[in-house]
């Protein structure tokens, strides 16, 4: 059975109606919250600008991508081990690579963009596309055309996807892969495209 993304998206949207008293959404084995993308973008991009204005070897793009990859790696590990995953997604999985489709459907339901798997070469390469990344949209709106890709959150998360599939067992596999974003709407490209490869390559 192929992965039915709409079934996963529907389950996440239904489940996200349940809130704890503080507004936290316990779902797919992890704790989620609603977060304004404009606020998130502002934190990221102002951090990048501030760090860029001082003498440092640290690059904000790398730091933000790494933070996202560590978070995405842990989050999707939790999701993959949840009872919701076991009941809803697991029956549709025929081969290990199908997990990427499951992860992608969950990420779409989280509101992270209109995401598409372009290519997956097992153990080696993942190519992803985002048609409406909120990071690219937000950057364009606030700062205009960028000189480089700005979707740090998605870059990190896609790296985490490959870490979970082909890295060492959790928690030792994080950063086995690294993602780049050769095309980004923030640069004026028609969509954002990501390529994930082994960090040792
Ligand atoms: Zn982008």
Image: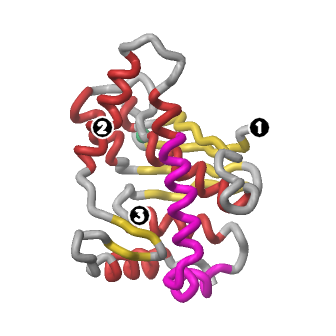
Of the numbered discs 3 and 2, the one sitting upstream in the chain is 2
Looking at the picture, tell me which residue is in the foreground, 176 or 195: 176
Residue appearing at x 58%, y 66% in the figure: 77
Assess whether mark 2 and mark 3 are in contact (beta carbons under 8 angstroms): no
Residue 127, horizontal then vertical, whole percent: 60, 49
Would you say residue 128 is visible in this rendering? Answer: no
Residue appearing at x 41%, y 63% in the figure: 108
Of the numbered discs 2 and 1, the one sitting upstream in the chain is 2
Residue 92, horizontal then vertical, whole percent: 60, 83
Residue 42, horizontal then vertical, whole percent: 26, 37
Would you say residue 134 is visible in this rendering? Answer: yes
Say what secondary structure mark 3 lies in: helix
Q: Quadrant of the C terminus?
A: top right
* Residue 100 image label: none
Residue appearing at x 35%, y 42% in the figure: 135
Relative to residue 37, is residue 180 depicted above or below?
above
Residue identifier under label 3: 108
Looking at the picture, tell me which residue is in the foreground, 13 or 36: 36
Comparing labels 2 and 1, the label whose residue is closer to the camera = 2
Residue 161 left/right relative to 191: right
Q: Quadrant of the N terminus?
A: bottom right
Q: How busy is the neighbourhood of tag 3: few (under 14 within 10 Å), some, or many (20 plus)?
A: many
Of the numbered discs 3 and 1, the one sitting upstream in the chain is 3
Comparing labels 3 and 1, the label whose residue is closer to the camera = 1
* Residue 200 image label: 1
The residue segment tinted magenta is 66-93
Q: Is mark 1 within 8 Å of ligand 1?
A: no
């Amino acid at each position: 059975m192929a992965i039915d993304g709409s079934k996963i998206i529907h389950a996440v949207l239904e489940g996200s109606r349940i809130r704890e008293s503080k507004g936290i959404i316990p779902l797919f084995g992890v704790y989620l919250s609603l977060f304004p993308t404009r606020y998130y973008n502002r934190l990221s991009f102002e951090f990048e600008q501030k760090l860029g204005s001082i003498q440092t070897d640290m690059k904000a793009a790398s730091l933000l991508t790494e933070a996202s990859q560590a978070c995405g790696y842990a989050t999707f590990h939790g999701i993959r081990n949840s009872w919701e995953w076991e009941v809803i997604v697991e029956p549709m999985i025929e081969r290990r690579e199908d997990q990427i489709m499951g992860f992608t459907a969950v990420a779409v339901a989280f509101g992270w963009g209109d995401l598409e798997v372009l290519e997956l070469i097992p153990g080696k390469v993942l190519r992803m596309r985002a048609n409406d990344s909120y990071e690219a949209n937000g950057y364009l709106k606030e700062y205009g055309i960028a000189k480089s890709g700005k979707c740090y959150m998605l870059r990190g998360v896609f790296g985490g996807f490959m870490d979970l599939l082909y890295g060492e067992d959790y928690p030792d596999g994080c950063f086995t892969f690294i993602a780049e974003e050769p095309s980004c709407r923030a640069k004026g490209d028609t969509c954002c495209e990501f390529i994930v490869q082994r960090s040792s390559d």
